[in-house]
Image: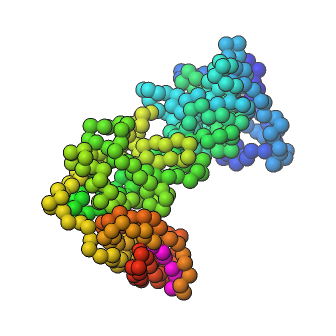
Amino acid sequence: EPWSGIFLANDSQTGALRRGDRVRITASEIGNTNTNPSFRDLPYLIEPDFEILAQNVDYAEYIPVVTTLDVAGPESSTASYEAMVLRFEDAYIVTNQADAPGSDFGEWSFATGTPDDEHPAIRVRWNMAQNSLRTLNNFTAAYNDHMRPGSQLNFVQGVMGFNFGNNKLTMRTEEDVEATENMFHPNRIFPLFLPANNATVDLGSDDLMGQWAATTDADGDELTYFFVLTTEDDEAFENYVFKTRSANDGRGNTVTIPRSQLRAVTRPLETESFRWTVWVSDGIDTVQVSTKTGPNFIPVSRNIRLVTPTSAEMDDVPRTFALEQNYPNPFNPVTQIRYDVPEQAHVRITLYDILGRQVMTLVNEEMSPGRHTVQFDGTSLASGSYIYRMEAGSFVSTRKMMLIK
């Protein structure tokens, strides 16, 4: 069929061309990829003779706006759009795994309109290369992993091609797609560090401390982490027994759960065997930490044994108010502050700089009797000495800490 667009084989001269260059081609040999049966016949120019007429041309006006029905519908011809940059407006993500359930080749698909329009889907390939042809972009094969199927798109654009039996679009940069809403779930692939799998925590003497790697969100949303605990037989965490935000109001990647709080939750269950995991939320979707095999996400959890002492074994209620020295000290950037509360009381722990100016409030709530711990994250503060002060009724105590970065 008549060419609408044509690829240039990559060589030292064509490789130096940039988007927006206007060229005149006066002669060339013609190549064809029909040596590979997985690709439709794809003509291209080999070592063309050309001159550059202008640079930085605004080429947007030359990009056709089409629908997926135009390109991949029953009466359409992909060949007439081959090697052209096309723009599809008012679309939606059909799937983030076009080759599921068997394989994952990094492809996702979209269609114009809405599902009611029944427009065919077109795959988006993270790169496309054949022989000496190539489409350059800034993507990896994992770009599609965390996409949200159903997300509405203002537009998608890229270079049209065909391989392995499918129409495929290759985006050139992230600016080739614009969503009207979030396009991505939070990245759910991140390692869990503490507590270790099959760890035992003695709730008579130890608080539970959790830690994991921070993750990301491709939309740039602020993430909130949750530590979630359930019984050993609840692998799906459908009926979890305990859930709490991480440090720094859910923004940190650590958590410290007082043993008195865990005892109150686990003692009535009459079991010591539990399972824990981490959920992460971007404010729209909440997903569980996972690994990935092919196109499938596999939720990750860890086993833990929580040993709760009997009343006869435990005398964990302190006799007096007390504020302990933070540990570690000096620290960077996280430290723990333990304090004792012998009776129900409103407790306030405040942090000051060395000049006596209030920096933040660490605790300001009604506390039950017991030994408690608060975690302090000094990431946003400068190195130096700080003072923390505990007030509970007539009790007042002050200590000094050192942040070293």
Q: Nearer the viewer, residue 110 or 397?
A: 397
Q: How many marks?
A: 0
Residue 370 image offset from top left, x and y in percent: 30, 66
Q: Is residue 373 left or right of residue 148?
A: left
Tell me if residue 293 can be seen.
yes
Residue drawn at point x = 44 percent, y = 54 percent: 245
Can residue 131 be seen by looking at this rendering?
no
Q: Quadrant of residue 61?
A: top right
Magenta residues (range):
349-354
Residue at (21%, 59%) from the top-left corner? Answer: 202
Q: Nearer the viewer, residue 389 or 145?
A: 389
Residue furthest left in the image: 312
Q: Is residue 288 magenta?
A: no
Look at 62% across and 26% down and name the residue there. Answer: 122
Where residue 109 sits in the image (x, y, percent)?
A: 59, 29
Q: Is residue 353 magenta?
A: yes
The image quadrant that residue 389 belongs to is bottom left
Q: Does 343 sit left or right of 295 as displayed?
A: left
Please state which of residues 133 and 163 is positioned toward the viewer in this rendering. 163
Give the image's coloring scheme. Answer: rainbow
